[in-house]
Image: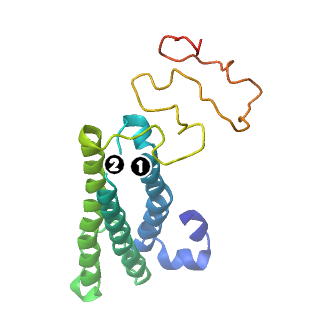
Amino acid sequence: MTGVMVASVPLDTQVHDTYFVVAHFHYVLIGGAVFPLMGAITYWFPKLTGRMMSERIGRWVVALVFVGFNLTFFPMHMLGLQGMPRRIYTYQPEMGWGGLNLFVSLSSVILTAGFLLFFFNAIRSVRSGAPAGPNPWDCRDAGMGDHFAAAKLQFCLYPASSAVPIRCGRSARTFPWRPACAPTAGNS
């Protein structure tokens, strides 16, 4: 997305090698990849571990990461439009970028705190989180089916569904892979 934006010659002339490019790249990267990844980890966490992540801590994570993200990278756009170059470790005081640059640096602490709290929540939840039921989000899909509780051999049984199955040209019993665990009565 950043490449599409700076492909415009007038804009690229203004923002080339400035903090605008850094800010927009991180807006796209974190907003488009890291936020959804954190959501996916939260969604699949009960399935993978059999435990729930703390919702209270999760709300703090969302608030800290969202606020820290915007307070860190939005001002960088303004700094870039003012001509602040990247890849320079210090700037002359008369340029006027010092205050906003300090604000960006301090805001990144909020963002970092949010990410650290997310990892703390995950580690804590693996060890002592509330047990997750077989379908903690009340989903009606094969991935979170009622019979698929997290366990050591959770992938030994094929999912049973009352809905029309998703087909790939094979029946559910003729997949080319085999489970890592030994077959039991009913799934051989």
Asked if labels 1 and 2 touch by Cβ distance under 8 angstroms, the answer is yes
Q: Which residue corresponds to mark 2?
A: 53
The earlier-in-sequence mark between 2 and 1 is 1
- Quarter of the image for residue 73 reads bottom left
Within 10 angstroms of label 2, few (less than 14), some, or many (20 or more) residues? many
Q: Residue at x 42, y 69 (%)?
A: 23
Q: Which residue corresponds to mark 1?
A: 42
Residue located farthest toward the right when viewing the structure as drawn = 169
Q: Position of residue 76 (x, y in %)?
A: 38, 75
Q: Residue at x 51, y 20 (%)?
A: 156
Left or right side of 92 for 134 = right
Label 2 sits on what residue type?
Met
Q: Distance between the residues labelled 2 and 1?
A: 7 Å
Within 10 angstroms of label 1, few (less than 14), some, or many (20 or more) residues? some
Q: Which residue is drawn at 41% across and 35% down?
A: 48
Q: Which residue is drawn at 59% across and 44% down?
A: 140
Q: How many marks?
A: 2
- Quarter of the image for residue 61 reads bottom left
Image quarter in which the N terminus is found:
bottom right
Q: Position of residue 146 (x, y in %)?
A: 53, 36
Left or right side of 53 for 15 = right
Q: Regarding mark 1 in the picture, which secondary structure is present there?
A: helix
